[in-house]
Structures are given as C-alpha cells and as structure tokens.
Amino acid sequence: MVTRFFAFATVVFIVFRILNAVKYKLPVSQKIKEYVNNLLPVAELMVWVALVVWVAWKVYGTGNYFALVSIAILFLLSVVPVTFLLRDFVAGFYLRMQNKINTGSYVETEGIKGEIKRAGPVSLDIIDSQGNICSVGYYKIRSKVIKKQGDNQHLEKIQLVFAFDGHKKANEIVPVLQAQVMSTPWVAVSQKPW
C-alpha cells in the first residue's frame, strides 16, 4: 500500500513538472498562457492537499495507526517550511492576479530597481542596472509600493524650448512647431515631417 502511495505521488509530481515545462509552448493566446501560469500552481497545491487527505483516510481505514502517527509527525515537521512557502505563494498569486508584475517589465521596490527576469511561484528575479540578479520573495514586497514604468522604459524625457515671435497667431505657429519637432534627431525615422 505504501508503494502505491509513493507511486501516485511520483506520478502527480511528474505530471505537474511536465505541465510547467509545456505551459509556454501551448498554441494559445498570451492571455490564456498567463491564466495557466497563475492557476497551475493553485491546482497543484489543491492536488497535493487532496493526496495527503486521501492517504491519511486510507491509512486510518486500515487501522495501521503506527503509519498514521508517522504521517502526522512528518506533517508537523513540515508545517513551518510549508507555512513560509505558502505565504510567499499566496502573496505571489495575489500580485500576479492584479497584474502588478510581468516578466520583462521594469519595477522599483524596496531599494531594488530593474527589469523582471522571472516571476516564479514564490519569488521574483529582478535584473538591476549593473546586471545583478536579485531574488525577492513575494511576501517581502506585497505591502510595498511597486512603481511600474510605461511600456517603453528606454524613453528619455526631454524638455524642448522653442522661441516664437509674440506677434504670430497660433495657426501660424503650429505648422512651424510640427516641422521643428519632426526634424529633431530622436523622432522615429518612419514619420515624415509635414
């Protein structure tokens, strides 16, 4: 009976590792991939809890109380590490569902600024400006302010100063202003000046 429990646990472990490996290769839209990425760890957690309950129920039904006590001791020894793991897992799930963290976006939190390289189930890997990878648990940043930049973090803010004759009307200034802005070197080459 014990070998059957271990075999079933091994199958569950392998199935979820395979699902984690192929979730990005599915031929579906990016939004569905994000939902799968967020919901797969929750499904895995529920399957593991169901497996533990099923094993305890089966062992209790056979009257093998020594095995039941052994399972209870192992369960109690794993409570502290699992508590910290679940704390980070739930905080990460909450942040991902709010769409506050996405791979490739630029964030700033708790003294760490950089691009998110990987958003795992319990931690976040951020590449800072020096190229260092900082790994931060979700629980440490869940109550902090997360600053997100716009879609293109490489844009620089430039203040332009133009001088015009005070006697010109607005309808005369606008075409001149458009031509001057479009002739600046940082404007996209694909746009033609008026």
Image: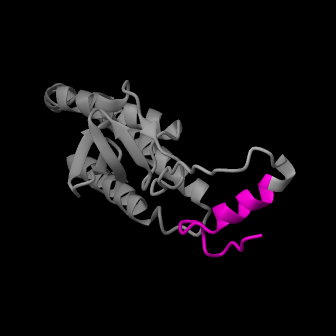
**x, y percent for residue 133:** 22, 53
What is the quadrant of residue 185 in the picture? bottom right
Magenta-colored stretch includes residue 117: no
Range of residues picked out in magenta: 173-194
Q: Nearer the viewer, residue 64 or 101?
A: 101
> Which residue is at a point 54% across and 53% down the rendered structure image?
151
Quarter that holds the C terminus? bottom right
- Image side of residue 75 versus residue 36, left or right: left
Is any atom of residue 119 visible in this view?
no
Vertical side of 18 occupied by 137: above or below = above
Magenta-colored stretch includes residue 188: yes
**x, y percent for residue 54:** 36, 36
Q: Nearer the viewer, residue 37 or 63?
A: 37
Q: How many marks?
A: 0
> Which residue is at a point 47% across and 51% down the rendered structure image?
37
What is the quadrant of residue 175 in the picture? bottom right
Vertical side of 20 occupied by 62: above or below = above
What is the quadrant of residue 28 in the picture? bottom right
- Image side of residue 150 versus residue 169, left or right: left
**x, y percent for residue 22:** 44, 66
> Which residue is at a point 15% across and 32% down the rendered structure image?
74
